[in-house]
Image (cartoon, helix red, strand yellow):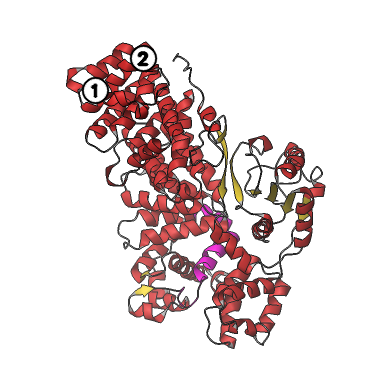
Amino acid sequence: MDPVQPEPSIRQVAAATAEGSSVIRVGRDDNVGTWLVSSREIDQEEIDRVRLSFAEPDGFTQVRAVLQRYSLVIIRGKEDVGRRSTALRLLDEVASGGIREFLTDWPSPRTDLLPHIDRPCLLDLTFETDVIPEGFGRQLADLVRPMYETGGCLIVTVTPALWTRCAQETKRFTVDLQMPDPVEVVRAHLKAHDAGGERLTWLGVPPLSEFMGELRRCRTSPRDAVALAARLSEFDEHTSEMVKDLRRQLYHWKDYLDKRLGGVGADRSDRHTVARRRAVLVAAAVLDGSPAEAVLASSDAFLTKIGIKVPPDEFLVGPELSGMLEDIEEDRADKKAGTVSIIKVKPGVDDAILGRIWQERPQLHGYLLEWLAEIAADRSQPSSTLPRVAEVLARLAEQQRALAVLDIMQSWLAASADVTKHRLAVDVLERLAVSRDIGSVVRRRLREWALSRRAEDGVLIGVAEVCAGRLGRYSTDVALNRLQLIAQSRRGVEVDQAVVRAIRGVAEHDGKRRLVLDRILAWSFEEETRAAGMLGLSALTGPTGERGSGRDHLLDAAEFPMLRKALASAWSVLLGSSETRASAFDLAEVWLRRADDELASPDLVVAILGPAFLKVSNDAIEVATFLFAPVRQSKTREKLGLWLLRVDASGPDVDPLQDESAGR
């Protein structure tokens, strides 16, 4: 077993830092075993959008009163009733330094895993996988006094089905939220985006005013009301045709789809004709903008996929291609160009078609997803097909909760030889990982893949790339947690290189560099994550090419003595561990060469490596060989060796940057 290092923990180093200092705080990730609960600052853009376009739902005043009294409120309601907007609106009223949102990787909700709540915070439990245990309700009640004393507050959003066991314990903190008036939602969003206010006046004038009454009678959801407001803002004139267009969008093109997807043919021949027409419609929705031949071929493949064998005579006596395309009322301009588009004249109808199939014909779910995956794999398809299919899959996942899409993305990543598929899978997962709808589910799936011993290298590389992109900007802690798990798997050079690139990518996001180093150093001090710490330290301070941040980290260390001590402490741990010693010596060699090439300060390298080598007394021969072997001589190596020889006279706590004799 590796010797225990007699070194103060990085948390102790951080605690010694003066309040308000810009020195990084290490060890702030709230890990319990392999579980992580982190928090992120909610984007100001989202908060501003709520300020400009919020419409109060039924129950808003009560939510505010409970929050003011207890510093805690549970907003219970169905999805898409405006729970998140309500929470942000109220937290914004009391926030002076931003609003934080908890991102949870836990087996079950537990308040002891939540970071300290000393400011306005949001916890969304909508996508928990099981009914929330009763104990969590009691734990929440116990947070009221501590939050009141620290000035923090917490809003929890949850669905009624998940909250059944906690309902009694949290009755005084819980408010049931109902949908806001859809007309007020439309009005609020128009007010935010209609600078002249002309469209606002239309709301009170027939025929639009009559349509607004229809919205109230139908109890239109906030999501649909927002979409209608966006569509309404595109019109320049208030006409009956405009209202017809809005009505079709509200009802998801129901009349159009009833005619084309409802009912069946009277005899077998009619049934085959109906099946062909419907398959063309579905293919056109998926491949909007593609050549007519590609749409037809894909529609035939869909029929084959679901086991429909069209008799040969149907192709002679049944409808011609032009007739089927006219039936779906595709755009005339695209027809002349040889392509098929239905969304130009019917905005949103592609989502409506696929949504109708998904909701009304659940038996087709597996067939539909397999068919989409096969279209993406068909190399005979136009180059525009694959991005379009990826977009369709992402929207199915978000809008229909089609989580089987994640299995398709996993298969695309596993097929590492197909670079295009791999890139598109990463793009789709990046989008879904930060989705306000299913983001938490996707982030957990990424974590499962990172933990899996059976995951293909392509899947792990893909997860790393997702972490380096939008997920890394969205939540550094969540991204680094997945990268840490992958680094610990020790899968090989390609996977390690992907982790290194991803860590550098996360560090390059605005304002993330110091936070990333904070986390990497913390990994170095834990035995189970030490290998990940070594890989991370190499990523941040090793050769980085044209856009690396290694020099920036060393410049930070030159400016902040406490960071130098933290780096030296991490080095001593890595050099003292048999698991990471060889890699640590290799990275030290890189540092010395960089200093010799004037890419880093020699004095700074000595300041960090010197104390670390000094503590590895059990490997004195190995250290001496590293420093004084003739084939490895360099100016910085000599400087380091001289400092180590003289340190006994100066004392072990001397800072090499302030030790003038080290340079002589």
Q: Main secondary structure of the magenta part?
A: helix
Q: Residue at x 59, y 74 (%)?
A: 229
> Total of numbered circles in the picture?
2
Please tell me in which quadrant of the rendered image residue 454 appears: top left
Region of the chain picked out in magenta, as a range: 341-367
Residue 402, given in percent of the width and then of the height, sits at 54, 53
Residue 386 is situated, as x and y percent measured from the top left of the image, at 37, 58
Give the position of the C terminus as an image quadrant. Answer: top left
Is 642 or 230 nearer to us in this picture?
Answer: 642
Crowd class of label 2 (few under 14; some 14 to 19; many from 20; radius 10 Å): few
Residue under pointer 1: 638
Quarter of the figure that contains the N terminus? top left
**Is residue 298 shown above or below 318?**
above
Name the residue furthest left. Answer: 631
Residue located 79% across and 51% down the image = 69
Residue 454 appearing in the image? no
Asked whether 369 falls inside the magenta stretch, the response is no
Where does residue 51 sit, x and y in percent of width and height? 63, 65
The quarter of the picture where residue 226 lies is bottom right
Which residue occupies 35% across, 30% down?
Answer: 657
From the top left corner, tell me how far across and down residue 621 is, in percent: 29, 11
Q: Residues within 10 Å of mark 1 (few under 14, many from 20)?
A: some
Q: Earlier in the sequence, mark 2 or mark 1?
A: 1
Q: Nearer the viewer, residue 648 or 114?
A: 648
Label 2, label 1: how many angstroms apart (C-alpha)?
18 Å
Label 2 amino acid?
Ala
Q: Nearer the viewer, residue 101 or 307?
A: 101
On residue 649, which mark appears?
2
Q: Is residue 102 visible?
A: yes
Q: Amino acid at mark 1?
A: Glu
Report if residue 356 lies within the magenta region.
Answer: yes
